[in-house]
Amino acid sequence: MKLISWNTQWCCGLDGVASPQRIVDTVRALCDFDVLCLQEIAQGYERLQGAPADQPAQLASLLPGYRCFFGAAVDEFQTDGRRQRFGNLIATRLPVVRVQHHGLPWPADGSVMSMPRMCTVVTLIPPALGPLRVMTTHLEFYSAPQRLAQARALRAWHDEACAMAAAPPQPGDEGSPFQSKVHTPHAVLCGDFNAEPRDAAVAAVCAGQGPHAFQDAWTLANAHAPHAPTFQLFDRTYGSEPIACDFVFVSGGLASRVIRVEVDGQTRASDHQPVWVEFG
C-alpha cells in the first residue's frame, strides 16, 4: 500500500494559483498511490488567494477510480447564504467499510487567532495488510495549548478504537445501524501537525502504551536521519528556516511493514511538501 499526505494550502501554489489539477498531477508523479490524504481543502472561500472553487467536487472528478471523503472542520454560511467549508479529504481506491469525522477540541485561547479542526477517519481493507484506519488531520498553528489538546484527543480516539477491537460489541446482522462493524487496532495517522519532531504535541501522539501505540514512520524507515523539512522550504512567511511538521504515524502492528518514507522537496504547488509512505 502506498499513501501520500499533503497540506495543499487550498491547492494554492507559491505562484498564487489555486489548481487542484496541479495537485493531482504532482501526486501522480510521486507514486501510484492507493490512499491520498489532503489537508486544507476549500469550498466557497472566494477571498482566499487564488479564489478556490468547489475543491472537493473538483478533486473527485480528477480522481476517477477513487472514492473521496471530505470532512469539513469549518462549515459556515455567509450573510448572503453562500456556504463555506474548509477541511480534509481522503481519496482511496481500496475497499472502504466505514467513515468517521471527529471534531477536535477547541479550548479557549484569546491570545491568538484560531479555527476549528477535525480528523477524518476511513476504515479500509488493503488486501496485503488487512483492516486499518486511515486518519488525517490538521492541528492548530497559532495556539500551542489547543494543538496539545488536539494531539491528546487523537491519541485517545486511537486508544478507544484499540479497546473496541479487543472487546467488540455484541454482533448484530439485522440491517440496522447496530449491525456489526469492522474494528481494528491498526491505524495510520497523518497530516500537518504544525509541530516539529520534539514538540509536546508530537510527544502526546506517541505517548500511548501497549503494542499499538503510534510510532513515527519517518524514523522507522530512515533510522536516525533528521526529518526532511516539509514547510518553509521556499516561502518564509511563517518562519525563517525550513522545518518538519507534516508526519505519518503508524500503530505498532504496522511498524514492521513500513519500508519507505520520502518527502518531495521540489514541488512549489503548495507551501508544504508532500510526504509519501510505502508499506510492504
Image: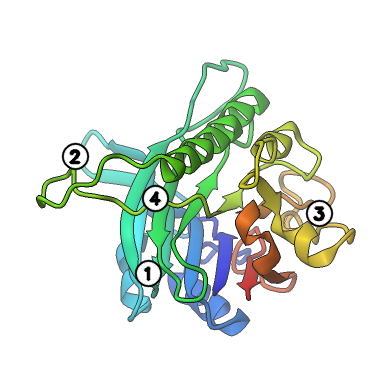
In the image, which is nearer the foreground, mark 2 or mark 3?
A: 3
C-beta proximity under 8 Å, tags 4 and 2: no
From the image, tell me which residue sits under label 1. 59
In the rendered structure, which amino acid carries the disc numbered 4?
A: His
From the image, tell me which residue sits under label 3. 242
Q: Nearer the viewer, residue 266 or 102?
A: 102
The residues tagged by marks 1 and 4 sit, at their Cα atoms, a distance apart of 29 Å
In the image, which is nearer the foreground, mark 1 or mark 4?
A: 4
Say few, some or many: other residues with alpha carbon within 10 Å of mark 3 (under 14 / 14 to 19 / 20 or more). Answer: some
SS assignment at label 4: loop
Image-quadrant location for residue 67 = bottom left
Q: Nearer the viewer, residue 240 or 144?
A: 144
In the image, which is nearer the foreground, mark 1 or mark 2?
A: 1
Position of residue 155 relative to residue 110, above or below, is below
Residue 70 x, y percent position in the rendering: 35, 55
C-beta proximity under 8 Å, tags 2 and 3: no
Residue drawn at point x = 54 percent, y = 74 percent: 1
Residue drawn at point x = 76 percent, y = 44 percent: 196
